[in-house]
Structure formats: C-alpha cells, structure tokens
Amino acid sequence: MIHNDIQKLIQDALETLDLHTEVVLEHPSDLEHGDFSSNVAMVLAKEAGQNPRELAEKIVSAIKPNEYVEKTEVAGAGFINFYLSEQFFTQKTHTILQKAEKWGASDIYKGQTILIEHSSPNLFKPFHIGHLVNNSLGEALVRIISFSGADVIPLSFPSDVSPGIAKAVWAILDKNWQDELTIERIGEAYVHGVAEYENHKEEIDAINTSLYNKEENTPQWEVYTKGRALSEKYFLDITKRLGSHFDAFIFESESEAQGKRIVKENTPKVFQESDGAIIFKGSEYGLFDNVFINSAGFGTYLAKDLGLLSLKFTKYTFDASVTVTDIEQKQHFQLVKKAASLIEPQWAEKSEYIQHGRLALTSGKISSRDGGVPLAEDIIDSVKERALVRMRESDRGENEETAESIALSAIKYAIVRVGMGKNIIFDLEQSLALEGDTGPYLQYTYARANSLLEKGNADTVAQVYDRAGLAITDIERLLYRFPSVVERAAQEYEPHYIANYLAELASVYNTWYAHEQVLDGGETQKYKLALTHAVAQTLKNGLQLLSIDTPAQM
C-alpha cells in the first residue's frame, strides 16, 4: 500500500539522520496540500534541538526518490506534504476497474466472527422512527464489517413479553378484536391499553403475569399468540423493505428466565436484596442503583439484557458482540456491562454498545396512525409520495420502484451521514434534493456516470488505457482513499465516514463533469471514461455498504 511505502520512505530518512519516532500520515483535508502529510518534524524538533521547519527540510532532503511520489515539500510550520505521481493514479484507476465490486474491501477482520444486534422490535407495537434510525445504522455496520473480512451474524432481540404487551392484549380483548386482528389494530390497541392502564391496572397486571408464566388455554394467551405471529411477520416485512435480514432472533422471554437465574445465583456476591426486589448497586462504581428483579418477581430490562449476554455466549463462538442502541439507553448498558464484568469478565470484554442519536422531523407532514411517534412506514410512504410528485413535475414519468429507492436513500443517507451519538435532523424536502448532501444526489451522480458510460461504449472501459497526457484530477486524488475510509468506518463503527466521503467524491466528479468534455473523441476520452467508470464503481460500492440502492436511471 502506498501509505506504508511513504511511511517507510520517512522512516529510512529519519534513520540516516539518527532520529527515531513513530511516523503518522494523514490525508490533508485540502487537496491542494498534497495526498499525504506528516508532522514528524514537529514531533521530533524539540528532541533534535532544531527548528521544526528546518528539520522538515533536512528530512525531505534525505528521502529517497520513489516512482509513485511526484514531489515532496515542506509547508507551514514544518508539515511534510507528499504529492503522488501520474503513474500511481493511472494504475489505481485500472485497479478499481479490475476489483469492481470488491473495490474497497479489506481483511482487517479476517478470521473473526462478530455478532451485530440491531432493529430489536417491541412486538405488539409498530416499527417507529427510532427503529428506523437503529436499522439504518445497524444494517450499515453489518455490511461494512462484513466487507472488511468478518463473518457477521446479524441478530435481533424482540421484546415478546412485557407490561406493554399485556396492555395491548387487554385492549384487543376490550375492543373485541380478537377474531379480526390486524397489525393496524394491534397498534391502535397498544395506544388504547397505555391510555387505560391506570383505570384497569389489576386486570392488565394479571394478564402480564399470565403471559410471563405462559398460561396457555386462556383468552389472553390466544390473543397473544395470534398477535405475536402478526407482529413477527410485520417486522420481517418492514425490515425486508429496508434491505435487512437477520440470521437469528433471541426473544426476551428466553433471556428474562436466564437473566433471573444469573441474578439470583450472584446474590449477594454481585446483587443485593432490597424491599422484596433484587438490585445492583451501581453507585459503588460511579453509576446508579437499579432493579434487576422487581418485587413481583419479574426480571427487568436490565436482567433481560444480562440474560441475553449469557445466551449469546452459549449459542455462539465469537470475537465481539456489537449492539446498536439509542443514546437514551447509554447508562442502562453501562450498568449491564459493569454487572456482567463482575460475573463473567469476558461477557463485558467482548461486548460493545454503540449509541445513536434521535431523529427529528423539521418539514413535511408525516401522518402518525397512533397519534404519537411517527411510524417507519408512514415516513417512508410520505417521502416516496413526494418523490413521485417530483417525478411528475419534472416530466420524468412515474416509476414506483425508483421512487421507493429514492425515498429510502433520502431517509437512510440523512441518518448515516451523521456520526454515532449525534441527533439527526430530517427535512423531507431537502432530503430529496438532487444536489447537495443527500442520498438522491449520490444516486443521481451514479446514474449520470452510468449514462455516460453507455454512450461511450462501457465495454471498452475495462481495458487498460494510458491517460494520454491528461492532468491529474481531484477525482483521482479522492478515489484511491476509498479503502482507507471503509477501514476507518469498520474499526470505529462509524458509517458516516463513508457517507461524507461519497458526498465529496460526487461533488468533485460533478464539478469536473461540468468543465470537461468527456466524449470528445480525443486521445484522452478512453481514460476519462475509465475515470468515470471508477467513480461509478466507488459510488455503487459505497452506497451498497450504506444499504442504499443505485438505480441505473433517475
């Protein structure tokens, strides 16, 4: 890799000057400052007793020539900037075309098995805006880490037993919907049950107890089993629409029993009895005290997540377990992880809990069938309808499949472009724009490049062509960075690095396209088409990692 080659060039130069330190290279944010930059002279200046810039000049003088480095220069207070050669960029363009769908892949996780848990639904409750955020980021991580060599096992942890489910079951019986139950009615029942809980507390609590105890041959159990089946199918349908699949489910009913057993076995070693409940004194570890088994004898969500950890280690052999959660659950999982570390250290050592922010809608009317939190399907359908309107307004005709793809890209990109843990602003109108930092803009750029390739006979692009004197473009100076961007996203669990990179690449390509006649019939046409093909391939690979489709036409 060129990164390693340049590091060695600097390291060899330092040895000739009898200097020693770790060499760190970065890509300058401004392309005018070169392709790689190092602050090694500033790091060593004090030890060497020299002015940083003067030391940088000495290091540059000691660097041996390299066919892939066009020039090396000192900038600012002592940065050393490297500019890569035409030969390097020409070869890299052909490498991209040769690797095709594998371009950007790595083996940094080769030989590792990684569990990724995301999109865990509450059965008997619609898939809402929070689940949409979790799914978008979780699915992106599944694809990015798999692309980086790991054997990824996507998991979901559905809530199939809870007081909320008992409220929904009671409401279904109260409304006499048990014989004509639909997923829409389940959602309405959940809202009704929550609203009426205080007025029917004893009835609902009794239903909750019977469901936890799996009391079959009862009206509530019949409603529960029917509603659960409908809820599971609904979850699979909506996540399939979003482009996700899961290798397995571990249900809360299973983890609750496991969690209670673990808590009781580790009382009083880790947990303590308190007023008929069993608690964990997190305050002793800088956290907070909380209940793992309540006074009614049921495991709380904390006990369920502890049981889930145990079940993961029982069912699978893996190197890491990554759970994507809402930012509001950060303290919850800190408590789970701390308690786990006192019971079985590897449970905590191999577990990562990645938090995402909340999504806020700023424009565009989104219906909400339950009158509360916007539902995922309602958001997707609203954005899709607006995409169809724009198609009609631009005389491009209506295409349901393309409109669906555009809607999903608008939503997903708005989510993944933001760093983990940060809140997300979703503007319905702006998210559909075919210019700027949006998913549809990236799709449009891909479609534009694809159209150009068809006009220029794309079959010839896979062949090797010389650049015929074409000057190095900013496109090339971004393209070769794609693998390192993917690697960073995989290592830090941060899909936004890829999203931001693709936005910059699309912007640079479109600027170049606006000023460059690609199909000019000249000597450089074939290389310019190869460059366009490389951009299209990179956009396609990157968007697929973000679970965003690339329509050939827009």
Image (spheres, helix red, strand yellow):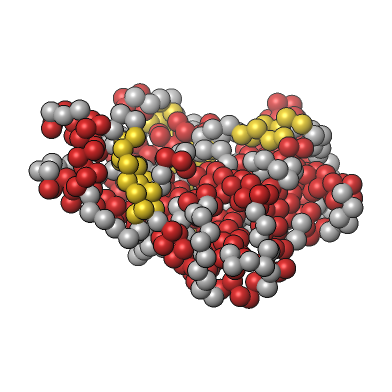
Image quarter of residue 201: top right
Image quarter of the C terminus: bottom right
Q: Position of residue 144 (x, y in %)?
A: 49, 55
- Residue 241 appears left or right of 547: right
Q: Determine whether 536 is above or below 82 in the image.
A: below
The answer to whether residue 136 shows anywhere in this view is: no
- Residue shown at 70% from the left, 59% from the top: 447
The answer to whether residue 554 shows anywhere in this view is: yes
Q: Determine whether 278 is above or below 515 in the image.
A: above
Of residues 406 and 194, the one drawn nearer to the viewer in this rendering: 406
Q: Determine whether 355 is above or below 276 in the image.
A: below
Of residues 187 and 274, the one drawn nearer to the viewer in this rendering: 187
Q: Position of residue 107 (x, y in %)?
A: 38, 62
- Residue shown at 50% from the left, 69% from the top: 466
Query: Which residue ends up furthest to the left in the rendered image?
Result: 18
- Residue shown at 87% from the left, 49% from the top: 394
